[in-house]
Amino acid sequence: MPGGRLTQQERRQIALGVADGLAYAEIARQLDRPTSTITREVMRNGGPSAYRADLAHRATEARAHRRKQTAPRVPQAAPQAYGRDAEAVRAYEEVFTTVMMASGMPTMTARVMACLTLTDTGSLTASELVQRLHVSPASVSKSITFLEGQGLIRREREEGRRERYVVDDDIWYQSMMASARSTAQIVETARQGVTVLGAGTPAGTRMENIARFLDFVSESIARAAEQAREILHTKPQAPSDAGDAGDASDPERNVAKTDEFPGEPRS
């Protein structure tokens, strides 16, 4: 497998593959590169709809040049805890960031979120984020404001005026509940459309089916989040040899696997 940075020719092949609608894994196989390398390359340079090989190559060279200029001022990275491989952790943080970006999160915000989430403490100060990410305080501040507005982090005041930003263990539950509430609003609006368009008309029927589908999804998300919430506050248990009978107190096993649409009779 070739190592080092992507060449300009490889970037042109990536651009052709993206334009042809190939999956990142297929492009990676053609180049004998890890899929994560192709994913990061595309998402870091405009995404699949805006990726351009020449622009991506120049942007990468510019980033490398900036890192080289600032290298003497960057302190040496501290040893990783628990015997972790520092390079593997760094690569995984890039993958996690890329996934957050693919979900719609801005690039800098995704980097801040990944940095906070992957720390053992789950919290960092603004200055620690600046040092870890090698970015300006303004960039961190803007990202923190966005994440706080989404309910994904919270602030803790330390001695003096310094603040610590915390990834709460409950944020994924809160995120799922917010999604359920947002979907429920769409359901209400769709049902208003049925009244306006007329029940039984083609458009009215379409809106009613949308409402029924999303109502089921919204209720399922909220119910599953409530049932599984305890998972966020417990330590994973080692696999046992007791079989798959499960424990009635285990929230992971209690989350409903199937359900009927609300209001419809069970078969």
Image: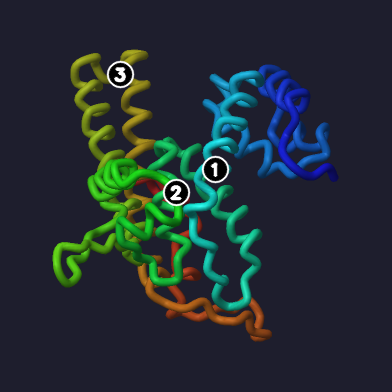
Q: Earlier in the sequence, mark 3 or mark 2?
A: 2
- Percent across and percent down for residue 203 are 33, 15
Residue at disc 3, secondary structure: helix
Mark 3: amino acid: Gly
**Location of mark 2 (residue):** 134
Q: Residues within 10 Å of mark 1 (few under 14, many from 20)?
A: few
> With respect to residue 167, does 81 lie above or below?
below
Residue 53 falls in image quadrant: top right
Secondary structure of the residue carrying tag 1 is helix
Q: Which residue is located at x 25 percent, y 50 percent?
A: 148
Frontmost of labels 3 and 2 is 2
Q: CA distance from mark 2 to mark 1?
A: 9 Å
Question: Which residue is under mark 1?
Answer: 67
The disc, 2 or 1, on the residue closer to the chain's N-terminal end is 1
Q: Are marks 2 and 1 in contact (CB under 8 Å)?
A: yes
Relative vertical location of residue 201 with respect to residue 256 in this rendering, above or below? above
Q: Which mark is residue 204?
A: 3
